[in-house]
Image: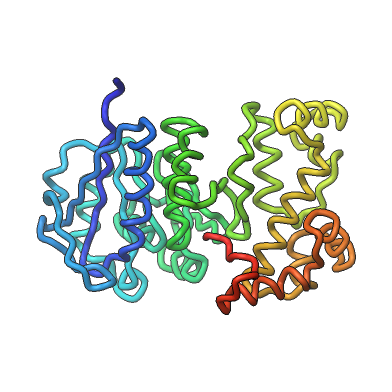
Amino acid sequence: MEPRRHIVFVVFDGIKMLDVAGPAEVFAEANLFGAHYSLSYASPSGEPVITSVGLRLPVDKAAADVTEADTVVVSGGDALVTRAVPADLTQAIRLLHPRARRLVSICTGSFALAGAGVLDGRRATTHWRHAQLLARAYPDVQVQPDALFVEDGGIVTSAGVSAGIDLALALVEQDHGGDLARNVARGLVVFMQRPGGQSQFSAPLEVRPPRTPDLRSVVDLVAAQPGLPHTVGSLAALIGVSPRHLARMFAAEMDTTPAKFVEQVRLDHAKALLDSGCGVAEAARAAGFGSSETMRRTFVARLGVSPSGYRARFATAQRGGKDGVAARAR
């Protein structure tokens, strides 16, 4: 049996509860499918903390008493963007960084990492609303505001609150493979996410990520930026193969063609935009369809309903109608 991977959550007063609970549930769920994670919680002082929802969260020890960890997770909190990062928190991060294989932040937890100086010269991200503030406050950090999560030298930073779940799934996949990570996603009824912009929307759980690194880079690009003018030729050129060879790769590993894959990703993206309240024309542009009419034809052919009809059904579901299209889990 492989050794347990120790995950340490560094918590503090005002910490966002979902930033802790979401990733922790992912790791705990992974244990049901054969992973070997142990979870513990540490505060700078070793004292319990009060979370953003008013719950008192006990801890196992002080951060200084953590001697080893596979992964250290620093979650976010609203106060991290309104006042200076507490000195005891930055000291805890500096102590734990060299003791862990990887250091992770969730949402505004990146401000704590930046305050500790561990992001200097590195690429990082945070919640899109606070990305400009992070860049101004810490000019030595290379902020990537459009990223869902960013890994640089064993330090991984993630975007908004729910992105912590996406990141935890990605870490489980990194540790134990895609099959186990998909089982976790199914168990928690969430979608598997891939690295990319915050405009990224997830492919269906049944889609198996390609084994071939070159093909996966193509798939990741399309998933992250469906609005780009993707063609078979441009995607083939990305990895230095012929369009015919790329088509063979898609057929062998994805059981589809490049064009159909791009169309499906754009369809998923457009559905999510409509779900979130975007208009039809705006969704068509952002998803890369080029025109509302092109998107309408795709919706009718694939779903049997127009974009406006789909949006109306979703609105009904939001009001609690029984016949509406259920909102996508995010």
Seen at 20% across and 51% down, the residue is 41
Seen at 81% across and 44% down, the residue is 260
Q: Residue furthest bottom?
A: 319
The x and y percentages for residue 107 are 41, 61
> Quadrant location of the N terminus?
top left
The x and y percentages for residue 298 are 84, 57
Query: Left of 130 or right of it: where is 94?
Result: left
Query: Left of 115 or right of it: where is 222?
Result: right
Query: Left of 296 or right of it: where is 324?
Result: left
The x and y percentages for residue 191 are 54, 50
The x and y percentages for residue 292 are 85, 68
Q: Is residue 125 above or below residue 253?
A: below
Camera-nearest residue between 194 and 82: 194
Camera-nearest residue between 71 and 178: 178
- Find residue 84 and report its image quarter: bottom left
Camera-nearest residue between 72 and 6: 6
Seen at 70% across and 28% down, the residue is 253
Seen at 28% across and 71% down, the residue is 52
Camera-nearest residue between 320 and 211: 320
